[in-house]
Amino acid sequence: MMRAFVTAVYGFLYLPIALVVLFSFNAGRHASEFTGFSFQWYGRALSNTFLMEALTNSLIVATTSAGLASLCGTAAAIGLGRAGPRTRAVFDALFGAAIVVPGVVIGIATLVALVQLFGIVNPALAALWPGDTPPRLALGYGSIIAAHGLFSTALVTMIVRARLGALGRDMVEASSDLYAGPFTTFRCIVLPQILPAILAGFLLAFTFSFDDFIVAFFVAGSQTTLPIYVFASIRRGVTPEINAIGALVLAASIVLVIAAQLLLRRRTPASS
Amino acid sequence: MSSAARKRLVTALLLAPAAVWLFLFLVLPFAAIVVFSLGERAPAGGYAPALTLAQYANLPARATAFWNTLVLAPAGALACLLIAYPVAYYLALKVLPQRRLLLVALIVIPFWTSLLIRTYAWMYILGARGIPAFLELVGLPEMRFINTPGAVLLGIVYGYLPLMILPIYISLERLDRRLLEASADLGATPFSTFFSVTLRLSLPGMMTGFSLVLILLLGEYLIPTLLGGGKVFFIGNALVDLFLQSRNWPFGSAIAVALVAITVVLLLAANRLTARLSGARQVDLL
């Protein structure tokens, strides 16, 4: 009986996804009738310039924010391993807040703070700029990357710290006994062992940023990311074109998550 | 420079980028909305400086959003818990180890795939041309599913079930099997072993899952918007309305601060309760 229940739950989790994929190949327009197999909605999606622009924006934002977060997060994870208990407590609280504060609040707060900041900086820039067209700071790529990077840095820090904690001390000690400097020890011993965790963190951060709607919705300014585009088209009315986009997004996320899981599972002999 | 001072400097340099990020995009923005929440709405929208609690006194104006969120979020989290427990139990204690990895991965994958697309799938299924059209086809009376609280609840369970299953699974998987054998050896029925050993020891996982799902649900926007169709309003909807449409930033800020306060109180209460129930420290979130 339990088996049947569990099977039903897996069906519940995957059926809607399967339907989106199935109907993305539907020749007809409606969910109630499957009128034949067709790639037309994929063709339409791929030739939609607004959609492709939104996709490009999403890829730029996700790559940059996940990349920056991997650097900052890894550095922070290593730094916290060396820091005193009080520093660690402060960072723990802030990273915890970055993870549990609802995305909608992060979006609003970043919007409010940046608009205020730009209100001070832009007139100053205009007054001080020697040329005719002073640069103007505005919401856009930068603000989405910054807001996504906050959650992502917390995420990478958490993952890399877990990995560092599981790392054997003996190899590090052996390395320094053999007169390797701290940097050499880090490069040859620590880095290879935490690299899978860093990559996994990068992939999960990328997935988060690529899928995030609510934070970007507030801080995107005039930019459009893929989820913002999809949300806007859903509000205009459900079309099979969205199914095609959805199927592609799902496929991309699934590949990334599986890659991240495999990286996290892989154990080096020294740490297992 | 002494080696201790150098070590401190390197540590500070390692922490500096994250510290700058946390300060600029977490501490400062949060301080900004606290300041805004004490201000007044400018005539043209936006913010005018003031020092008043009027925005907080006005919170009951959005009582429906708070009410919906504070009813549907715990209800959704509870529904997730009831469905998730048997699944986690099955995965941790009933499945052969070689199949377990795949089955757990199948739970992790939906959690990390686009909530927007997954919620949209239900819009498609529950919408007029989905299940209702199908029911009509087989001769059943016309029924409406979308834009009801039930649809929102369904979307919540669908969206957050994986996040509930994982922590419970972890706590059950770590459970020392010898305790179950000992309990059986001492004459306990499987039923009483479950209630006095298994369930008790998985309480921290249940609490982690429940508080995680509840906290994320408090700030939910997409599910009520897409499946509630503007009829089932959450706090998130009120915030989007106040910031992006009616541009009443001070009032919106007050609601955001209230939302964070509710989140923190619930989180602290959950941690307290877990510590009391299990006599142990809170388990990790991920």
Image: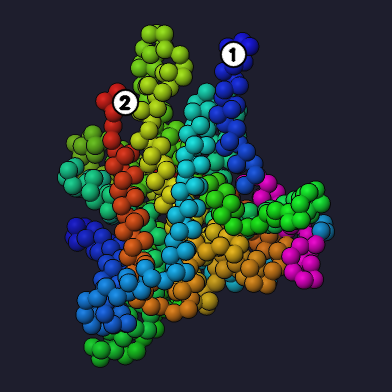
Identify the magenta region.
B26-48
For this rendering, which residue is in front, A126 or B132? A126
Same chain for mark 1 and mark 2? The answer is: no
Image location (x, y in percent) of residue B267 = 53, 48
Circle 2: residue type:
Ser
In the rendered image, which residue does mark 1 sit on?
B4
Residue B109 seen anywhere in this rendered image of the structure:
yes
Circle 1: residue type:
Ala
Residue at (43, 65) in percent of width and height: A52
Quarter of the picture holding the C terminus of chain B? top left
Task: Sort mark 2 into few (<14), some (14-19) or many (20+) by Cα contacts within 10 Å.
Answer: few
Image location (x, y in percent) of residue A248 = 33, 63
User: What distance separates the C-alpha of mark 1 from that of mark 2?
Assistant: 28 Å
Residue B196 seen anywhere in this rendered image of the structure:
no
Q: Is residue B28 magenta?
A: yes
**Chain letter for mark 2:** A
**Chain letter for mark 1:** B
In the rendered image, which residue does mark 2 sit on?
A271
